[in-house]
Amino acid sequence: MSNSISLIAILSLFTLLPFIIASGTCFIKFSIVFVIVRNALGLQQVPSNMTLNGIALLLSMFVMMPVGKEIYNNSQNENLSFNNVASVVNFVETGMSGYKSYLIKYSEPELVSFFEKIQKVNSSEDNEEIIDDENISIFSLLPAYALSEIKSAFIIGFYIYLPFVVVDSGYIQRSVNVRYDDDESGNHIYTDKINSVCRDGRLDNVIERTHFTIF
C-alpha cells in the first residue's frame, strides 16, 4: 500500500513538473525573449518554437542547477518520504529554503506582498503582520515570481526590439525622400536621398544626391 502511495505521488509530481518548469523557473524569461528576438528579425518560423524552447530549457537548467542540487541534498538529509504527508509538508516548508530564496530574490516585493495578503484574507492570521522572508508561503512566491519574470522579459525584449524599429524607420524615411526632379537639360533625374541613423539617434543625410538619368 505504501509503495502504491509513493508511486502515485511521484507520478503526480512528474505530471506537474512541466508546469513548474514553465512558471517557476527562468524558462519563462528565456522563452519570451527568444520569441521577441525572432519577431524583431522578421522571422516567423525560423528557428522553430521547439528549437527556441529547447535552448531556453537548456539555459534554464544551467541557471537552476545550484538550486536543484541544494534541494536534492536537503531531501537526502531530511529523509524525505512520500508515504508520510507530514514529511512532505515539512520538506516544502524547510527543505526548499534555497528555492524560496531564489524566488524572493527575483520577485518584486510589491507582488509578493499582494499575493501574501490575498492568501491571508480568509485565514485567521493577522493581515497587518509584517511580511518576513521566513514566513512567506511558496504559493504566494510562485505567482509573484512568474509575473515578475514576464515583466522583466518584456523589458529586455523592448530594448532588443528598439534598434530594429529605428532601422526600419530609417528605411521608411529614405523611401519617402525619393523624388523626381528636372535638371537644366530637361532630363528627368531620379534623386535618392539616403539617410542613416547617427549616434545621437537622429536621421541625417549622409549622401546628398545620387543622380540616375531616365531615358
Image: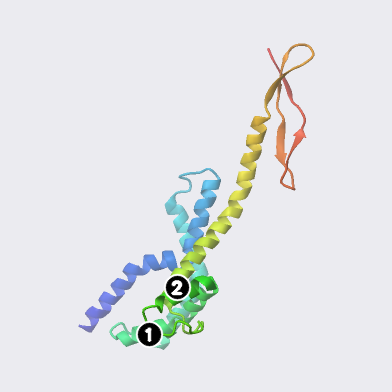
Q: Position of residue 54 (x, y in %)?
A: 45, 58
First along the sequence among labels 1 and 2: 2
Visible residue check, residue 119: yes
Quarter holding residue 116: bottom left
- Callout 2, which amino acid? Phe
Q: Which residue is under mark 2?
A: 115
**Residue 124: image tag:** 1
The N terminus - image quarter: bottom left
Q: Position of residue 24 (x, y in %)?
A: 44, 69
Q: Mark 1 touching mark 2, by CB under 8 A?
A: no
| Residue 7: quarter of image | bottom left
Q: Residue furthest right?
A: 184
Image coords of residue 94 (percent x, y) = 43, 85
Residue at (46%, 84%) from the top-left corner?
135
172 up-or-down from 198: above or below: above
Closer mark to the observer between disc 1 and disc 2: 1
